[in-house]
Amino acid sequence: MTEAALPAPVAAPSVDRERLAAIGFVLPSFVIIAGVFALPLVLLLGVSIVDANGLTFANYKRLLGTPYYLGVVWNSLRLGLLTTLIAFLISYPAAFALARARGALRSVLLATLFLPLAASVIVKAFAWTILLRSDGIVNETLMALGIIEDPIRMIFTETALIVGAANIFLPFMILPIYAIVAQLDRRYAEAAATLGASPIVAFFRVILPLTLPGIIAGVALVFSLSVSAYVVPTLLIGEKYPTLATAIAKAYLLAREPGFGAAAGVVLLAIAIAVVALSARLSREPK
Amino acid sequence: MSEAAPHLVVRSVSKRYGPTTVLDHIDLTIRRGELVTLLGPSGCGKTTLLRAIAGLAQPDTGKVELAGRDITHVPPHKRNVGVVFQSYALFPHLTVAGNIAFGLKVRGAARREIDAAVERALSLVKLGHLAGRRISALSGGQQQRVALARAIAVEPDVLLFDEALSALDRKLREEMQVELRRLLQDVKATAIFVTHDQDEALTMSDRVAVMNKGRIEQLAEPRELYLRPASLFALNFVGLSTRIAGTVLAAGNGKVEVETKVGRLSALGNFQAGSPVIVAARPEQFRIGEQSEANTAAGRVRSVVFQGSRTLVEVDAGAGESLLAELSGRDGAIPVVHDEIRLSWPVTETFAFPMEMQA
């Protein structure tokens, strides 16, 4: 660096400037994500393991050590798993129907999927209570047809809860599967057929593996939505089916036990993260 | 070869999609070990015919027989055909070996048998070193070979190629044409190619079926197809030609005298006097100057295109007609643009076709 008279190379500062510009663009979103998502999670974890006397695991012991709260965890898991299963069974054929539909029919079908997303989940949950209550449309219709004499108890049952949740979260399963199916070359099925695969064999060996990424995305979405659902179980089944989400609300709003509520939140989050991480792993290594 | 029993027989197969007739009573018989091309423009029905043979499209009428078995109503997975698709349709979730093994696996073949067949198919297409690769890690040419290996591995009764080479670039395509033909002859495969590429058709096939509007216009060996086109469509679709419109003045003995704007020409053909016809000849039949038993016409050279071993000369013969001559340069000087020259060509290589409405 003895040639001090030489002008400084032009490239170096311009690279620095580019890098600075890139950092400048990334920084705001990084700050927002850190402040709005990461920080609260750290605080949540902190609140769950610290009380007036210092570090404690009492909240976790209570949550995972007493039969009642284990039941609550199990209820949440059950709600998540059953809702995901029902939603998948409906969505998979529906996604194919949607992908095969042409023109106006496809637009109408897509609209019926998208429009409910604009309505609040509370509205949809209430709609199910209206449908399913003793003097609701379903019971009235069945009685009018003479199929039943007395109203069937449907509302406030687990069946009502799962059916309602599956319906409300359905678009989150159909859309990712549909996105994959719509891209699927029909030649794959034809190639499988000419190679000697019957339609059923072709489905399990070719179509299902090729649509797996969509299934995994849909499962991750619907599971994390339904395992943590609050409004849906509150309105469709209520007190007798406590879940982690309702337990959290109770801990914060009624019992004034933020530490316990935070612990329940961390467990719920851990369950959701485990499922999403598993899905990501499965979709990275097909087969 | 001609003694061999028919291996694939298509009898009066028709197919309509709505108001459009895609296949119009197609008859086609292919012998074992024969390589046949269905050649034609898009929409001529060639792909639909291939799909009807594969079982992917159900014909409205007619029969398809393969290896002595009526397969008209047999679903594709029980036909024992091999299809190489234009897009290859290789399974992206399987490896190269997994793709090739697929057909044998779904047939429930034994593990050892599958491994041996995969190895054989891979070495046939010279891709043995890529067995464990993912499909997405292959080049277009390699994918083409895997698709071929996958179709061959199940030892199908007939191999069907749907524009299988058209996704390759020109140089690779020409190499594959020669290699594929040799490979198919080595394994004694019976194969049908669908293509719109006349070079591919002439290079690859024992016989070529020129298709137009759901019909086979001509089924012939490549050489005969070129030298004795059966219709104006076949003439146009394969190779270059000079075409001059005219009216038949006199006819007899399989020959016609035709009045055209470039003078009176003689041609082979059977027509009534007064019929409107097109007189045609291939460019390599033209010579500069006179020759006996020949048609002749004069004009001014419009363009000269040097093509290595030969030179294409286009001559403006006046009245909107032009002549296309291919000169070797061996028997005379090559003219230059604006030269006034006289060309002649043998009457026995001049054909008359009925004038038809061109789409």
Image (cartoon, rainbow, N blue to C red):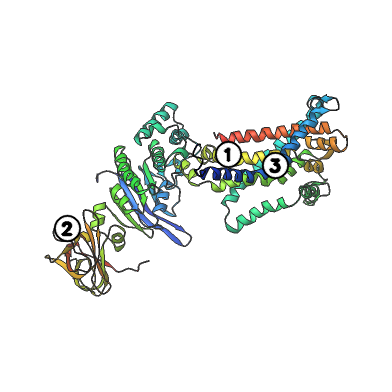
Q: What's the mark number on residue A110?
A: none
Query: CA gap, disc 3 to disc 1?
Result: 35 Å
- Estimate the spatial distance between the alpha carbons at disc 1 and disc 2, rounded to whole Å: 65 Å
Q: Secondary structure at mark 3?
A: helix
Three-letter amino acid code at the position of disc 2 = Gly
Q: Earlier in the sequence, mark 3 or mark 1?
A: 3
B323 lies above or below A250 = below
Q: Amino acid at mark 1?
A: Leu
Residue B288 visible, this angle: yes
Rate crowding at label 2 as few (under 14), some (14 to 19) or many (20 or more) other CA atoms within 10 Å: few
Q: Residue furthest left?
A: B292
Both marks 1 and 2 on one chain: no
B25 or B260, nearer to the observer: B260
Mark 3 residue crowding within 10 angstroms, few (<14) / some (14–19) / many (20+): few
Of labels 3 and 1, the one closer to you: 3
The image shows residue B141 at horizontal and vertical percentages of 39, 42
Residue A110: x, y in percent? 64, 53
Q: How far is the residue under mark 2 from the one under mark 3?
A: 78 Å
User: Which of the 4 image quarters holds residue A28?
Assistant: top right
Judging by the rendered image, the residue that carries numbered circle 2 is: B329
Residue B261 appears left or right of A9: left
Q: Would you call the spot at circle 1 few (<14 residues within 10 Å), some (14-19), or many (20 or more)?
A: some
Residue at label 3? A31
**Direction from residue B324 to residue B288 in the image, left or right:** left
Identity of the residue drawn at 14% across and 56% down: B330
Q: Are marks 2 and 3 on the same chain?
A: no
- Picture disc at residue A212: 1
Q: Quadrant of the C terminus of chain A?
A: top right
- Are discs 3 and 1 less than 8 Å apart at CB? no
Give the residue drawn at x 32%, y 54%. Answer: B198
Counting from the top left corner in percent of width and height, residue B246 is at: 25, 72
* Subunit of label 3: A
